[in-house]
Image (cartoon, rainbow, N blue to C red):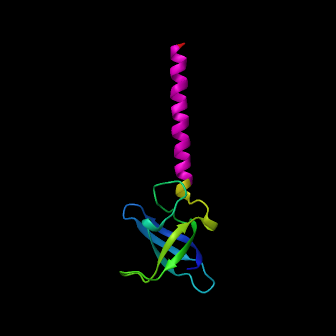
């Protein structure tokens, strides 16, 4: 399977799927994407953001109403997805909040 570049048209976290517009010289068709085919580098929460550029492979051996679907969805050239950035920011917030709480405890003990 060859790699393709696309832009997320929409993705619904609650239902776990959406569509990616295939950015191709020949056509700009929409391709189905299921959350299980999203491959974040860090985050366990598989999601895509509208407008995000992604790289993926097309699987045409699909059952159901979609002829093809995006699989092995990553950031461009295998890099991070936006859900990885959110995951990292949340980790930093938790760390800095924990650090702030620790500093406040130290001040009250003095």
What is the quadrant of the N terminus in the image? bottom right
Report which quarter residue 23 is drawn in.
bottom right
Residue at 64% x, 67% y: name it: 77
Q: Looking at this view, is 12 or 98 the one in front?
A: 98
Residue 41, placed above or below residue 76: above
Residue 64 left/right relative to 26: left
Q: Percent x, y for residue 61?
A: 43, 82
Judged by its main secondary structure, the magenta piece is: helix
Residue at 53% x, 44% y: name it: 91
Is 92 one of the magenta-colored residues?
yes
Q: Percent x, y for residue 107?
A: 55, 18
What is the quadrant of the C terminus in the image? top right
What number of labels is visible?
Answer: 0
Residue at 52% x, 34% y: name it: 97
Q: Which residues are magenta?
A: 85-109
Is 65 one of the magenta-colored residues?
no
Residue at 54% x, 29% y: name it: 100
Q: Percent x, y for residue 4?
A: 59, 76
Residue lying at the far front in this picture: please name it.
Answer: 1
Residue lying at the far top in this picture: please name it.
Answer: 110
Q: Percent x, y for residue 74?
A: 56, 65
């Amino acid at each position: 399977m060859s790699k393709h570049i696309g832009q997320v048209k929409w993705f619904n976290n609650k239902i776990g799927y959406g569509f990616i517009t295939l950015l191709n010289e020949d056509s700009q068709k929409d391709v189905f994407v299921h959350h299980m085919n999203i491959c974040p580098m860090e985050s366990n929460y598989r999601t895509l953001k509208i407008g995000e550029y992604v790289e993926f492979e097309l699987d045409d051996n699909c059952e159901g109403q979609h002829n093809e679907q995006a699989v092995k969805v990553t950031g461009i050239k295998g890099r991070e997805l936006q859900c990885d950035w959110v995951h990292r920011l949340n980790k930093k917030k938790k760390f800095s909040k924990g650090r702030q709480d620790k500093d406040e405890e130290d001040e009250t003990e003095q």
